[in-house]
Image (cartoon, rainbow, N blue to C red):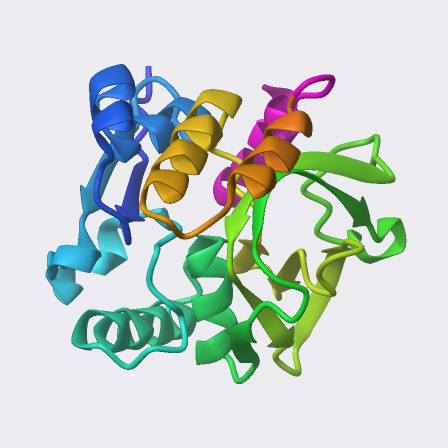
Amino acid sequence: MVELEQKKYLLFLGVPDSEFVKKTYGGYHNVFVSLLGDEGEQWDSYRVVDGEFPDENDLEKYDGFVISGSSHDAFQDTDWILKLCDIIKKLDVMKKKVLGVCFGHQLIARVKGGKVGRARKGPELCLGNITILKDAVAPENYFGEEVPTSLRIIKSHQDEVLELPENAKLLAYSSMYEVEMYSIEDNFLCIQGHPEYNRDILIDILDRVLAGGHITEDFVATSKATLEKNEADRKFWQKICKNFLKGQASFLV
């Protein structure tokens, strides 16, 4: 019997663990692995926001990478963000699979020549609905046989991709943002929303941001109302992200 080589994945964490996430899930590492991981895989994480980075000589051994969200702006020039930009460039040359989420989605656009800035229609902290450009998902098609016209996803951001890189392909948009999801060749898939989040994580974020005086009670009430009758399409997002990171074989899962 041939023993298959263990698949290895690396998560770049651009955010500290909140007390709620730490207590409930053991940290954001576990939140991502619960969405993306499969039995027998190795998942390593580095908290890049705190200056933790892997040895760049070790990047080759990983099958795929994930760049998380962050409360920092992807257009900032802080040391850790610039270092992460350099790593993205290296992964691009290596043609590695990189999934960008929220901040990661924006940072990849920046590295590849796009433009990122403050969201023109304001921030979002809610369950949002995005429109899928069904004709654009082929030929890679990480969606599977049935491509939906729209998907629900939890949103938590104040910045957006203002202009896509030249070789990027737009996959989804919304009434709030022109770029909700895009891909670049077969090695970058970028999502503005948070496929890894659930309603409890969003509610905790809303309560913390309100306590910090950054949003109003009316804003929170409107945001929480989006969760009353609907849920994020987390299972579908799981399928999309796994299909991208792990190849077409995961359609059989």
What is the tally of numbered marks visible in this picture? 0
| x and y, in percent, of residue 102 in the image | 49, 54
Q: Residue at x 27, y 33 (%)?
A: 29
Q: Nearer the viewer, residue 182 or 249?
A: 182
| x and y, in percent, of residue 103 in the image | 43, 59
Is residue 64 a member of the stretch shown in magenta? no
Q: Is residue 194 left or right of residue 48?
A: right
Residue 240 can be seen in this image: no
Q: Residue at x 35, y 54 (%)?
A: 70
Quadrant placement of the N terminus:
top left
Q: Main secondary structure of the magenta part?
A: helix
Q: Is residue 242 left or right of residue 41?
A: right
Q: Nearer the viewer, residue 31 or 19?
A: 19
Q: Is residue 158 above or below residue 88?
A: above
Q: Is residue 225 above or below residue 185?
A: above
| x and y, in percent, of residue 136 in the image | 82, 57
Quarter of the rendering containing residue 34: top left
Quadrant placement of the C terminus:
top right
Quarter of the rendering containing residue 167: bottom right
Residue 102 can be seen in this image: yes
Q: Residue at x 53, y 76 (%)?
A: 116
